Image (spheres, rainbow, N blue to C red):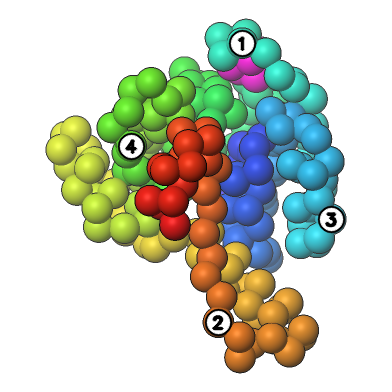
Amino acid sequence: MKIIAIVGARPQFIKHFSFEKACKNKIDLITIHTGQHYDANMSDIFFHQLGMNKPNYMLNIGSGKHGEQTARMMIEIENIVEDENPEGIVIYGDTNSSLSGALVAAKLSLPIFHIEAGLRSFNREMPEEINRVLVDHLSSILFTPSNLALINLGKEGIFDGVHTVGDIMKDLVLYAQKEYLMNQKVADEKYYYVTIHRPYNTDDPQRLGYVL
């Protein structure tokens, strides 16, 4: 079975690591890296430190306005998908890379497998919120990280092909605990893992204090 996975931004590399490991010797996995994140510390470092396979295709799209970036990605992805003729497309999360891959797959009548489906901020000012809603409504099989995500999909009338499988990013946390923390003999220390990266969470001291 041949599957194409679309990645392009930092969170997707983390998710892809876990999926790539699960696919080994089971699925012919083709990876397209759109280049949405292209700085070494936002892209290369993950592939290097985690020992991930190099993407089969590097599009090097880079930055740009949302419409321009999405359109350029779609043009390149469509050409690759037509050449590779996969049996489905894996989409992670909610980036412009996600939306581009989903739109191409939908236009070519290919199954879309959305990993991390059903998440909502209910803030339509976030471009990611628009992306995740559209991708969910285009998807054939939706893998949700929680029951809350399952409920969110149900409120939008999405019931078919929905599976609650847990958080794929937690898989990497568990891997890191085993491979890195244990090796550094710090397993007995107590750590909290959190990501806080939205400007309206980090740029307002009162808001940041509330989150912490």
Which mark sits nearer the N-terminus, 3 or 4?
Answer: 3
Residue, disc 3: 48
Q: Which mark is residue 208?
A: none
Q: Amino acid at mark 3?
A: His
Residue, disc 1: 65
Closest to the camera, between mark 2 and mark 1, is 2
By secondary structure, the bulk of the magenta-drawn segment is best described as helix
> Residue 64's spot in the image, x, y percent?
67, 13
Which secondary structure, mark 2?
loop
Q: Amino acid at mark 4?
A: Ser
Measure how far apart labels 2 and 4 are at the Cα level: 30 Å
Name the side, left or right, on which 150 lies relative to 105.
Answer: left
Closest to the camera, between mark 3 and mark 2, is 2
Q: Are marks 3 and 2 in contact (CB under 8 Å)?
A: no
> Residue 206's spot in the image, x, y percent?
42, 43
Q: Amino acid at mark 2?
A: Lys
Magenta stretch bounds: 69-74
Q: Amino acid at mark 1?
A: Lys
Which mark sits nearer the N-terminus, 2 or 4?
Answer: 4
